[in-house]
Image (cartoon, rainbow, N blue to C red):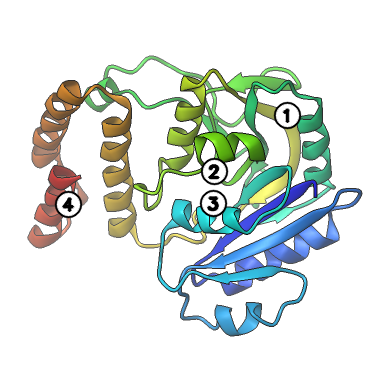
Amino acid sequence: MDLSIIIVNYNTLNLTKACIDSVRSNTNGIDYEIIVVDNDSSDGSQDFFETCKEIIFIESGDNLGFGRANNLGFKQSKGRYILMLNSDTIVENDILTRMVNHFDSMPDDVACIGSLLVHGNRQPCFSHGFFTKWQWEFGFRAEEGDSTSIKGAQQDVEYVSGADMFVRRWVAEKYGLFDPDFFMYYEDMEICYRYKQHGLRSVLFSEHGIIHLDGASSKSSYRKVCMTSQSYIIYLRKTLPRFKFFFVKSLIVLRRLFTVWHYRWSLKNSFDYIRILAIS
């Protein structure tokens, strides 16, 4: 089998249905499977998807988060390549077939690839990024470039957006897929960082064909800020030497203790946020 497409669903029944329909209508010439992992949804998703014969449906039994749910789907997959595809995406123009063909032409040191994403209004969307540096917390950040475009037909990037990340099976089997310590956010950065430590590359192609309805599956501002910040700390813990991490983490917690108030949260939410950072 060429491609295993893993879609994580959490109370996004209509989005996931539209995503699956777009894959089936716009993918030709390759052998693929669609695996839907449901994170204990309460919107009727389980009743609907367990009757869909065109997919492999997995009930996680709990809200595992993005990375661990994808890992669960990976265990059931058979494809030479694994695609982690967000539920809030729409596939067009036979893009998945073209990406498989690109991957087939890549040398073995390319671990994962992605394509250029667009928003629903067809404007460029975040498609790749740069490994976070703790110094950015304090304003020491040089201009890294545009994360919505690349130069040329393909370009090595530091990490590919997890919204449409293709990974070689043998790489995932040897070095792991997403780190289970991340509930959501930064897991795409960490996996590409980990692969790079093993001499592997991430490549982005200037192909268009995936619309990302960015944020459609994540609506709670306070919860999102907390999850993003927690994952940021976990990422630093994974990538910095132990002593340096604890020093940097202390600086970050202290800084945010004085800046958290600009969110205008309740006193309880503000202190809960700081506590989350402190124990991460």
Q: Earlier in the sequence, mark 4 or mark 3?
A: 3
**In the image, what residue type sits under mark 2?**
Gly
Q: Secondary structure at mark 4?
A: helix
Residue receiving disc 4 = 273
On the picture, is 225 further left or further right than 242? Answer: right
**In the image, what residue type sits under mark 3?**
Asp
Which residue is located at x 54 percent, y 29 percent? 147
**In the image, what residue type sits under mark 4?**
Tyr
The CA distance from mark 3 to mark 1 is 19 Å
Q: Earlier in the sequence, mark 4 or mark 2?
A: 2
On the picture, is 88 further left or further right than 280? Answer: right
Q: Secondary structure at mark 2?
A: loop
Q: Residues within 10 Å of mark 3 (few under 14, many from 20)?
A: some
The CA distance from mark 1 to mark 4 is 39 Å
**Residue 231 position (above or below residue 107):** below
Q: Which mark is residue 214?
A: 3
**In the image, what residue type sits under mark 1?**
Ser
Q: Secondary structure at mark 3?
A: loop
Residue 202: x and y in percent read: 60, 26
Residue receiving disc 1 = 206
Front in this rendered view, residue 1 or 202: 1
